Image: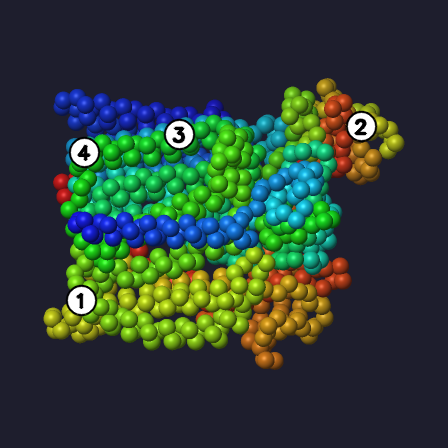
Amino acid sequence: MGLSGLGNLLLALASICAVASIGFIAFGMRTKDGEGMVKIGHYLTYGVFGFTSMAVVLLAAAFLGENFTLEYVAYNHPTKVGAWAWLYRLSGLWAGREGSLLFWEWILAIYAAFVARKFIDKNDRLGSVALGIINFVQVFFLAALFIKLNNPFQALDPSYIDATGKLLIDVAMNPLLQNPWMLSHPPTLFIGYAGLTVPFAFALAALITGDTSSHWVKISDRITVFSWLLLGIGIGLGSVWAYVELAFGGYWAWDPVENASLLPWLTGVALLHSMTVYRRREGFRTWTIFLAGLTFVLVLLGTFITRSGVVSSVHAFQEDMLSFWLFIFMMAGSMIAIIAGLIYRRKDLGGSETFDRLMSKEGSYYFNNLIMTIAALLVAYLTISSAFNSWPLAWLTSWWPAAGKTFGVATYDTLARPIGIFYILVMSVCPILSWGGGEPGSFFKRAKWPLAGAGVLSVGLLALWWFDMVPYFQQTADGMSLSVTNVIAVIGLLTAALAIALPIYLFIEGARKRSSAKGESFGKALWWVITKPRTQSGGYLTHLGMGVILVGLIGSTMYVQSFNTTLAQTPGAQLQAGKYAFAFQSLEEVTEANGDVSYTATLDVLREGKTIDTITPHLVFPLQLQSQNQSTQKVDITISPVKDIFVSFAGLDQAGNLALTVKFFPMQVWVWTGFILTIIGSALASWPKRRKLAAA
Amino acid sequence: MNKRAKQRLIGVTALIVIAVAGLIFYTSQGSGAGAYKKTVAEVAADESLVGQQVQVSGPVIAGSWIPGSSPLEFEIKDQEATDGSTLRVIWDGPVPSAFGDGTVAIVKGVIGEDRALTASSLITQCPSKYASATGALSVADLASQSSEIEGNYIKVTGYVVAGSVQGADAAERFSIADDVSGEAPVAISFSGALPEGMDDGSKVVIGGKLGADGMFAADEVALDEAAQ
């Protein structure tokens, strides 16, 4: 049996285990004394994990050994050579549609095995039903893998390889994907995506079993935070990749594939916060269950958009109608199941929330949910509207607003800026609002010091705005005018000041109180406040990071200045861009070990005549794409706390001058810094507590 | 929850929804109204699109652009139609990675009087979507799928049939088959220079289009390096 047959056999065995597991769990739960059968269902989940693991190992081995009898390996093998070549070969696992679907399913199989292990000896109805649901999702992914276009174990046409196994056709992994970002960005995203199946499964299981207590939330909340965190890291890695490698001239372009990953992240934020209310106060039950369902549906939509090319290529869409219907069935089925369950159990879902005032913690959680849901639906709508003018959705064109239209950065920005700033304002005040509301006077008493701190911080941020952002404003054809931009920026910066000042105040205040109560030193008390009540301190740190990100976003998306220009290849030749000059030093051509030719330009960056940095943007002509005259760029960036100077080198013009793009991104570092803070914050919050699961 | 709080909650929710709706309305009035997705063939055929904002995508035509020129001018062709319609694009901005001959460029902008598109955005398709390039077909594939691939640019590989090579002015320049025995060949028309070292039985990779007459019109003939 060839690799192809073996791989498909493993997938078939995994599918059988998954189907059988669902059968045993369902049957065992219906029969008296059926615990043994339910237990077999748990063991079969290990079987799914085992067989999919073997399939992944098989595919990985085929990549490592460059076994081109598999079509997927032939088309996605990297051409990199050298000591790290094996790592790039491993990344072939998720470099294409087929492999990444298998990888996705395998990650889900790991989560499923984890859940099975947790419940195998517990005879817990909720856990068993949730496991059955996860395995149902696994069956769906395994079924999708058997569709020809998704199957990583398709055999290659034997006429494409010679007797020694050498490949006769010129195919390989796209050179743009052969870089370290490819090793980290997709797997983190997939771990996040697949993990968000778990809260969905438990939410639906709670509806099915009728156990709508906070039991299911206590089981799945940490996995949810963890998955959401990984999804966030994946999005961040992707934007850094776009910034430094793809040379689109930015880190976020509202591309459909980027939006696809943002959607479940947005509803994930709402889900996490609702889970807190559910867990602590048995409130927001309907919201939490609904959001768990919506987030999972958006994960499926995201997976589907990325794989199918449905949005930017109608062709791929028609080619694979089976996957299309499979995904539509799964998305619609999940949402219908959740909504039907919510209606059926509506009497049990009335929480104990005392929602007497809007200015309460509950109030801010409610608006958090509302805004995030609206934002996610809006982005989803704008992203997929362009697909609504082709079959089988053409019937929508007549009445669906904006069907067949595609939207650019300007549209998204106009919507995202006010909504985003309002959202961060709601987020900022949430921690000092009390449950149930309390008297407005007590709120202002608590808000006094944070507001004072925010006032001081505002002065600094406005100074940064005036001196380091406003001068870089450049009017674009479809962008906002300077006056509108300035109004939004100032409101945004005042909001950011509050978002940053408040968590800092809360940490200091908490430490001060503890140190006076316990007689500890302030430093020790602060350490305790940050590391002990981790869900809380992690949340504060994440909020702080969001404030810092907001400052970065205002600078680096609203005040970008760009120059497209050329520079003569004579030593000392200079070009002026704003307050900076760039002086030509050298241009070197190097042929790398794998045959790629790279050109490195060395330029001095000068300000007021003084050299402040030397940069080396380069351009690579991969051997693989030489006949197409195709190149990839690696930009170089001079980083400072108040702005990035971004230089990309696009080649030589007819006169032999270097074609350069210079861009100024004010406050760019703030985006990355804030991002790292949110990662640390959410990691802190998802760190497992030594907590025995009640009854689980 | 008391009645008054509930009313307030509904009121503020309605306010937020109305504010967002207003924002959407405001955005849809300006340049944020979005661009209709059109094909190259549609732009070529429809005069009413002049002055309109559209999004068009298609592979960049080899040789239609000069690397490093600013503004960059290039042409794209239709991804599916075979009427040979093309669209000239003018782009004054940074050239993204992976721009090159055959790369699918997604451009958005306004169609001018001269039917050229002045682009306000240029994106080369995200790598995750073009990871699988099209490999070369065998001669047997060519025969069995002729109805689907007729008129599309494809690559085909095979062995030069012994004694089939003729001069540059012959309508049928040579033929190739799936193996050296020369059974079930396909005829190739080609007016360019044949690669050095091409002999009877050489393995070649040919790019071009299959015509309705069953003749494969090549514009590129190369020896398969791996097979030599």
Crowd tier of the residue under label 4, counting other residues whose Cα lies within 10 Å: few below 14, some 14–19, many 20 or above:
some
Front-most of residues B48 and A327: B48
Of badges 2 and 4, the one in the foreground is 4
Q: Is residue A687 visible?
A: no
Between the residue at mark 3 and the residue at mark 2, the CA separation in whole angstroms equals 51 Å
Between the residue at mark 3 and the residue at mark 4, the CA separation in whole angstroms equals 25 Å
Amino acid type assigned to the residue bearing label 4 in the image: Gly
| Residue indicated by mark 4 | A210
- Say which element carries label 4: loop
| Residue indicated by mark 3 | A329
Disc 1 vs disc 4: Cβ atoms closer than 8 Å?
no
| Residue indicated by mark 2 | B174
Q: Which of disc 4 and disc 3 is earlier in sequence?
A: 4
- What is the residue that sits farthest to the bottom in this orientation? A609
Residue A515 coordinates in the image, percent (x, y): 15, 72
Front-most of residues A298 and B199: A298
**Residues flagged by tags 1 and 4 on a common chain:** yes
Between the residue at mark 1 and the residue at mark 4, the CA separation in whole angstroms equals 40 Å
